[in-house]
Amino acid sequence: MSSFYLAVDLAPTRLTAGIVDGSGTVVLRDRIAATGRQAVPDLIRLVRRVLAAGPSPVLACGVAFSGEVDPIEGVVHSRRDPVWSGVRLVELLSSAIDLPVAIDSRGRASVLAERWCGAAVGRRNVMLMVIEDAVDAGIITDGRLLRGRSSQAGQIAHLVVEPGGLACRCGGDGCLDVYVGASALQIETGRELARTPLAIIERSGIMVGRAVASLAAALDLDLVLLSGGVPNVFGDAMFAALERELEVRLKLAHLSGLNVTMLGVESVGTLVGAAALARAVAPTVG
């Protein structure tokens, strides 16, 4: 008998829910705009609508959240959108839909998705960088997902890539987020992402290259995957600049086999990542 998972992707401007089957295929998807103070009740209505329209049995629900997540307590926080700050999302959803619920960051969910049924199947040391409104990552070392003391491992947005560089909202200077996050880029240029000047696109590639080289060296990775709206929009120009930077920085012997790949449309997607979270808490089907 086939089994299914309810998957939820909470991004800054949109709420997406879907049903994912046991092979990682999205069989149903629905999306609405995030609407300020109505976002939480809108989410409840969305997931109930998807459950009613989709196949069964649905075994569990997974949520990928763009912001700070406490996956143990099931609580989310967002500096950019106060409506999500302090919401006990696991408790709220499990009460509304009567299913086990797991939650984690979009970066950690996405790397689990790629290792389940995407570009990282069989890989034991991999990082996936999600570069969108802000920067996030999921990191697997020796086959295990890194979580950290407070379950925030993968928060690479404030890795310093340009000492003494642009000021960041964290209070520091030269953070990765300032140079590649979509919001920061649009504020700096005063343009939509698609109209970003080539010099800024190439600078973004250089900064991602610096971050990749540092993290790969420290974590002994063999695969780095890049996904999200920024690399999808910037495309080959960004990746070419990234590769040039890596040619300079990947001189250590243990980095000789490092593979860096931009996923683009080949990404299995954050919904599948949310389903990967659901798999971990789903009851066993006899």
Image: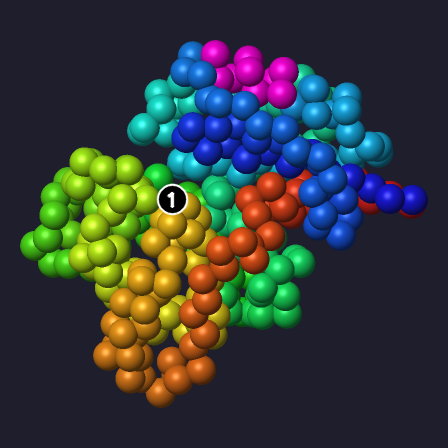
Answer whether residue 12 is visible to the viewer in this image.
yes
**Was residue 43 drawn as part of the magenta stretch in this picture?**
yes
Kindly report the secondary structure that dominates the magenta region of the rendered protein: helix
Q: Nearer the viewer, residue 168 or 155?
A: 168
Q: Residue at x 45, y 45 (%)?
A: 151
**Was residue 280 drawn as part of the magenta stretch in this picture?**
no
Asked whether, in this view, residue 137 is left or right of residue 110, the answer is left
Highlighted magenta segment, given as a residue range: 38-46
Could you tell me which secondary element the residue under label 1 belongs to?
Answer: loop
In the depicted structure, whether residue 244 falls above or below residue 190: below
Image coordinates for residue 103, horizontal then vertical, percent: 56, 37
Task: Please state, as top left, top right, bottom left or bottom right, where the N terminus lies in the image.
Answer: top right
Image coordinates for residue 68, horizontal then vertical, percent: 40, 36
Q: Residue at x 17, y 41 (%)?
A: 189
Query: Badge 1 is on which residue?
Result: 132
Task: Please state, as top left, top right, bottom left or bottom right, where the C terminus lies in the image.
Answer: top right
